[in-house]
Image (tube, helix red, strand yellow):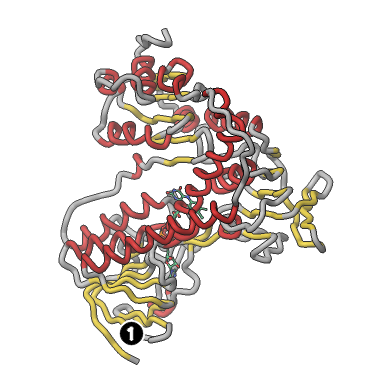
Amino acid sequence: MKTVRHELVVLGGGPAGYVAAIRAAQLGFDTACIDENPRFGGTCVRVGCIPSKALLESSHLFEEANHRLGQHGVQVDGVQLDLETMMARKDKVVETLTGGIDMLFKKQKVTAYCGRGKLRDVNSVVVEGDEPVIIEADRILLCTGSVAASLRGVEEDGDRIGNSTAALSYTEVPKKLVVIGGGYIGMELGSVWNRLGSEVVVLEAMNRIFPGIDSELANLAHRVLKRQGLEIHTETFVKSARVDGKRCVVEIQDGDPIECDRVLLATGRRPRTDDVGLESIGLETDNRGFIPVNENYETSVENVFATGDCIGGAMLAHKAMEEGVVCVERMAGMHTHVNYDVIPAIVYTHPEIASVGKMEDELKEAGIEYNKGVCPYGANGRARTLAEPEGRVKILADAKTDRVLGVHIIGARAGDMIAEAAAAMEFGASSEDIARTCHAHPTLSEAVHEAALAVDKRAIHTA
Ligand code: FAD
């Protein structure tokens, strides 16, 4: 078998891996990046963030054309769904972005290897594939990401009963779709198929949907999504799901079995660390399969590092990218860091939900005194012109210092608006700092300004 040598080998070409590889190359490391899939970009670009957002956008436009353009005086008759074109557009977006990573690798001189990578020892990885190769390296960075978790009793066939990957490529609109799990993946993809005409039933074991989101916003979102037609059952435990002839049957505790055409299992993700050869270098995971690391992203084995979904924490692409960058910058002796207190999180339903920093529930639980400023979208001129009056911005600031502790937004384009809050928090801003910042008119960001004013009870438009 051919043996090659690089200074750094990155195992996994998702957001953690490909970004780390590019940054490492910029810093002068001779870098290789391995992925089993010829299209680099990982879960995020191939079967996660990007295709789901492409479908959310297309299905939103379909919904607008069907039900909402009339209020703008735009009459559209005979709106029809062309699912094949919608899916082809999504695939094209994915193809363009994965192609972009190939170009970046070439430009930055990152050597890409395609095939399953397995650790041989602390200084080498074997890449299985058409042309197997052993890569020796001074340092190894593990970015093997995560896969959808399974659920006991749910018999996945990868098609009628499957995970998010299957739900991104249904070839026809299911008449009835049962979504198991009311987290962001289930609610986003449930929204897509609901907009395209499915009867969607969401089954969530906990007493609320969106478990990781500020409960005030989650409750509001629950109401809005229900109004949009999603049937949501909380405190509902799924016992089993199986294909039965032409139908799927989902059995729940304390209720009648539910028949449907398809089942989307969206109960979370688990780290992909069981088939990487960790045992060959004596690297142990924690009891949930995550790889423990220190602040330099070093594992317990010298010169072996790990970042992204496989180390746990928020399983988000931007968190993975930040870690990848900081990890290799620290290898280069730089003193950069990831501020885990300021990682935004967004749900791309309509309305969007975006959060950064502490949730109100967390502050209450920790006994931290805070002031709260709220601006409803209805008081914002731009929201009215967009016909998007449903939503609110909530700013939570420390009662003594006024430092912003958390910002939570539900409403149109909340995902873009949260960037201002994240930047402000990164600079340690007070709500007064945001209140003193001139915000352009008429923009949705004025609702952030107004909420900051409201922290000090001097809001103008919601006085
Ligand atoms: P991954 O993206 O999982 O990449 C790991 C890569 O390593 C994969 O390509 C895998 O094939 C490869 N690999 C693993 N083991 C090996 C091996 N032994 N040999 C070779 N290759 C290997 N996050 C957001 O921030 N925003 C969103 O809107 C969002 N939406 C999502 C929607 C869905 C439906 C899903 C499933 C996820 C979404 N996520 C989103 C989460 C996001 O995709 C992940 O957090 C992110 O991809 C993690 O990056 P990573 O590099 O750690 O791992």
Name the foreground residue: 98 vs 405: 98
Location of residue 223 (image quadrant): top right
Q: Position of residue 294 (x, y in %)?
A: 32, 58
Q: Residue at x 51, y 50 (%)?
A: 52
Instruction: Determine if residue 401 is in view.
Output: no
Residue pushed farthest right? 256
Relative to 80, residue 7 above or below: below
> What kind of residue is marked 1?
Ile
Relative to 394, residue 321 above or below: below
Q: Residue at x 41, y 17 (%)?
A: 381
Q: Quadrant of the N terminus?
A: bottom left
409 horizontally vs 20: left or right: right
Relative to 376, residue 28 above or below: below
Location of residue 366 (image quadrant): top left
Tell me the residue that label 1 is attached to.
134
Q: Position of residue 371 (x, y in %)?
A: 39, 19
Residue pushed farthest top? 463
Relative to 317, residue 298 above or below: below
Q: Position of residue 292 (x, y in %)?
A: 39, 61
Q: Residue at x 63, y 48 (%)?
A: 181
Q: For the image shown, how many numbered marks are present on the structure? A: 1
Instruction: Determine if residue 444 is in view.
Output: yes
Q: Position of residue 42 (x, y in %)?
A: 42, 62
Identify the secondary structure beneath mark 1: strand
Q: Residues within 10 Å of mark 1 (few under 14, many from 20)?
A: some
